Image (cartoon, grey):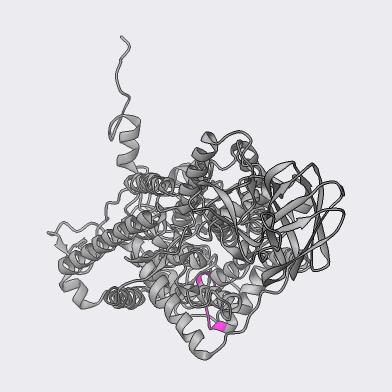
């Protein structure tokens, strides 16, 4: 009889439940990603379009989709893909905000998944992997990128490009496959078409390779990096030169010079002390409003110093525990130096220099590098399998990259037999442990066929170095019992592992000791009287202790061993404190982001237009400065700002009864604020214009040659055309019979107005002539 109900697995009911039990770290990572996406989408939806968003939308609304539009720089930024996406959304949804929130969330999802995969590729597995993942997913330094379209459309693609490019380079270093060079090139191009700052991916890839995958002194490491992986640098150099030629032909130099040394020091203290370090640890905890744009950091002094103390403790502790940690921190420092130098060269000496170091979006890309470096410092680099030991097609992992063959796969060669290629990648351990492969889930126990000798995979090619894992491992990365008696120079030719494995096979495995177990004081494993460690059982995602530390890592400090529980509790409290601080900071950012003058202004204008008479016309004015600043002119004009509205206002340059939209968005009649004509000599008429003569009207004050609005209130005996002159420039306007007024825009200046009419039989009387700025009537 067919069974019904939920499918079961050996690990529990349900496919999802079984997968969760087999892969608990992955399940936790997926949950964290989902929580971060929902949290950030909810935060973004509280706000609205802001500042540069309106400018990008206005440019898209007034332009056709042409190469000229896409290749035009915006504020000296090259971003054709960003302009294309904005153009498409503008034509489809106008000023609607939800499409932008959806796109930002989708990009964040791609970035989060890509970063999680990169972490699993780069660092050793284990529960601690969730620490750098959490830092990346919830860092307050990236809140602008996931909330503000004008920022996210640049920064999120750049961060995706960073992650993909690093992943491609790591796979190329470990496998030598040329297809990863294509992925590397495409990743960089993807970032560059959204944001020219993505060019920093090129030095980042080089620095990461030199710091983490090549050992030796700095100069030798750089030379070795260039020599070993020159195809990567050839591809990236060609791309960089081509992009710089294109960008240089269109951009104006934005390099600036700081006004003083004090300005530089203030900027550095602001950037590092208030933004980067507190931001990486859950800060800044307090924000300073910046109009409709995102707020800037303003951490309390105590929080700033606590963050720095915690950061220094993290650096010292990880360097003490892992040799590769020092290189990871140097990598972060090197990339942060590049970002800081670029920011200082383009922002200091400008009107933005006072707050340049407090703007998180300028360093949001640093979070990617910081999270990776913290992951490496905490967990160490994940060992890579050997890809040269076998002539047979190598098995691949889920990403399609080669991995070490399992015992069962090697058994296909025949019972009780190993090929020479097998022997070059295996050796007999002395602890009776089963084989562990590098690209399968590390630490997973592999069943050993009955009667077969347990084996463990070791790298087939080694270089003598300084304990840093790279594609060809150093001798220092081998277990102590497998290291050669004398280390060779760093750049001497590699030695195949056949001799190593042969030597290892000549040493018989120690038999099990039936004596009672006793715990090891360092890692808690049990040993027999002989001192040989017994097999450590490991789950697929929780490797045994020996898989979590490199053999050449310094021994654990005695204080950590003696006070393991206290240290663990302290670390747990620190993580909880950082999480609570992040939640507080994010909530306060959301409160600031939810205050949007532009949204309120638009809602008021829409309501006013719906209630206004259909013949209502408006003079064009700037929108409020807190919606679009004056520096964005001419895209701060109402005629441009409202272009994408379906029921947009009708703007004119001449009208009898025009209206204005005031700073709150309400419709008001127009008055002109400025000098007026002096009273005329004619009783009950003022200034009389008749018989084809020209009347000269002195003003109460001079007007500079500028853009003005003129109002003329008159009484006319008939219809005709009048002429207004000021400073040698003139404007013709219609004259109607009776008591009327006329408003028109005029460019000119002077202290005397001249008026005339075309029809000599018409008499026009006026005592109301004003030249100035249109303002709402109160």
Q: Could you tell me which residue is drawn at 56 percent across and 43 percent down? A: 95
Q: Is residue 65 visible?
A: yes
- Nearest the eye: 568 or 710: 710
Residue 271, relative to residue 92: is it above or below?
A: below
Please give the range of residues in magenta: 212-218
Q: Position of residue 627 (x, y in %)?
A: 52, 56
- Nearest the eye: 651 or 95: 651
Relative to 159, 764 lies left or right:
right
**Occupied quadrant, residue 133:** bottom left
**Occupied quadrant, residue 756:** bottom right
- Nearest the eye: 256 or 522: 256
Relative to 557, 48 lies left or right:
right
Q: Is residue 471 magenta?
A: no
Q: Could you tell me which residue is drawn at 61 percent across and 50 percent down? A: 641
Relative to 673, 726 lies left or right:
right
Residue closest to the far top: 1
Residue 525, relative to residue 86: is it above or below?
A: below
Q: Could you tell me which residue is drawn at 20 percent across and 69 percent down? A: 567
Q: Is residue 486 visible?
A: no
- Quadrant position of the N terminus in the picture: top left
């Amino acid at each position: 009889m067919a069974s019904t109900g939920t499918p079961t697995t050996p690990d529990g009911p349900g496919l999802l439940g079984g997968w969760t039990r087999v892969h608990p770290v992955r399940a936790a990572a997926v949950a964290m990603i989902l929580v971060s996406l929902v949290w950030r989408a909810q935060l973004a939806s509280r706000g609205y379009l802001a500042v540069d968003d309106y400018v990008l939308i206005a440019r898209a609304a007034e332009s056709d989709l042409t190469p000229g539009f896409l290749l035009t720089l915006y504020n000296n930024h090259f971003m054709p893909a960003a302009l294309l996406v904005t153009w498409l959304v503008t034509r489809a949804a106008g000023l609607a905000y939800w499409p932008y929130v959806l796109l930002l969330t989708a990009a964040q999802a791609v970035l989060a998944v890509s970063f999680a995969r990169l972490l699993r590729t780069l660092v050793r597995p284990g529960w601690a992997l969730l620490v750098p993942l959490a830092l990346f997913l919830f860092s307050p330094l990236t809140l602008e990128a996931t909330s503000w379209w004008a920022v996210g459309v640049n920064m999120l693609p750049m961060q995706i490009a960073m992650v993909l490019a690093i992943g491609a380079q790591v796979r190329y270093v470990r496998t030598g496959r040329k297809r990863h060079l294509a992925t590397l090139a495409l990743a960089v191009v993807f970032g560059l078409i959204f944001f020219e700052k993505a060019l920093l991916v090129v030095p980042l890839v080089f620095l990461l390779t030199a710091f983490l995958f090549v050992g030796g002194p700095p100069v030798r490491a750089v030379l070795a990096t260039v020599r070993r992986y020159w195809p990567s640098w050839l591809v990236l150099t060609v791309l960089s030169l081509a992009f710089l030629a294109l960008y240089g032909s269109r951009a104006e130099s934005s390099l600036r010079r700081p006004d003083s040394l004090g300005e530089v020091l203030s900027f550095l203290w602001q950037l590092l002390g208030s933004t980067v370090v507190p931001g990486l640890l859950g800060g800044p905890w307090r924000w300073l409003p910046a109009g409709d744009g995102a707020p800037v950091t303003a951490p309390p002094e105590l929080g700033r110093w606590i963050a720095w103390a915690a950061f220094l403790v993290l650096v010292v502790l990880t360097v003490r525990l892992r040799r590769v940690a020092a290189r990871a921190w140097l990598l972060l420092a090197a990339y942060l130096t590049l970002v800081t130098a670029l920011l200082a060269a383009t922002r200091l000496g400008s009107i933005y220099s006072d707050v340049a170091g407090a703007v998180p979006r300028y360093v949001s890309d640093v979070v990617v590098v910081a999270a990776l470096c913290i992951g490496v410092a905490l967990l160490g680099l994940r060992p890579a399998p050997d890809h040269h030991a076998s002539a047979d097609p190598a098995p691949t992992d889920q990403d399609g990259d080669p991995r070490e063959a399992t015992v069962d796969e090697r058994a296909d060669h025949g019972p009780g037999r190993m090929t020479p290629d097998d022997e070059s990648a295996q050796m007999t351990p002395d602890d009776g442990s089963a084989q562990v492969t590098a690209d399968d889930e590390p630490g997973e126990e592999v069943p050993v066929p009955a009667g077969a000798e347990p084996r463990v995979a070791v790298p087939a090619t080694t270089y003598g170095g300084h304990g840093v894992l790279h594609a060809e491992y150093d001798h220092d990365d081998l277990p102590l019992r497998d290291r050669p008696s004398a280390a060779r120079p760093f750049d001497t030719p590699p030695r195949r592992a056949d001799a190593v494995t042969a030597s290892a096979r000549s040493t018989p495995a120690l038999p099990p000791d039936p004596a009672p177990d006793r715990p090891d004081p360092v890692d808690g494993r049990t040993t027999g009287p002989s001192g040989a460690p017994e097999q450590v059982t490991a789950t697929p995602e929780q490797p045994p202790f020996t898989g979590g530390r490199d053999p050449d890592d310094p021994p654990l400090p005695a204080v950590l061993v003696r006070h393991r529980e206290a240290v663990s509790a302290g670390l747990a409290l620190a993580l909880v404190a950082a999480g609570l601080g992040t939640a507080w900071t994010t909530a306060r950012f959301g409160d600031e982001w939810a205050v949007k003058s532009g949204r309120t202004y638009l809602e008021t204008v829409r309501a006013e237009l719906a209630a206004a008479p259909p013949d209502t016309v408006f003079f064009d004015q700037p929108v409020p400065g807190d919606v679009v600043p004056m520096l964005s002119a001419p895209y701060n004009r109402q005629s441009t700002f409202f272009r994408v509205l379906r029921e947009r206002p009708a703007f004119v340059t001449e009208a009898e009864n025009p209206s204005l939209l005031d700073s709150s968005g309400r419709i008001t009649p127009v008055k002109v604020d400025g000098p007026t004509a002096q009273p005329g000599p004619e009783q009950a008429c003022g200034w009389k214009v008749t018989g084809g003569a020209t009347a000269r009207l002195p003003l109460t004050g001079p007007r500079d040659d500028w853009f003005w609005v003129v109002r003329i209130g008159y009484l006319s005996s008939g219809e005709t055309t009048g002429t207004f002159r000021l400073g040698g420039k003139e404007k013709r306007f219609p004259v109607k019979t009776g008591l009327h007024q006329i408003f028109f825009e005029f460019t000119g200046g002077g202290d005397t107005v001249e008026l005339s009419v075309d029809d000599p039989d018409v008499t026009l009387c006026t005592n109301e002539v004003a030249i100035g700025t249109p303002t709402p009537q109160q």
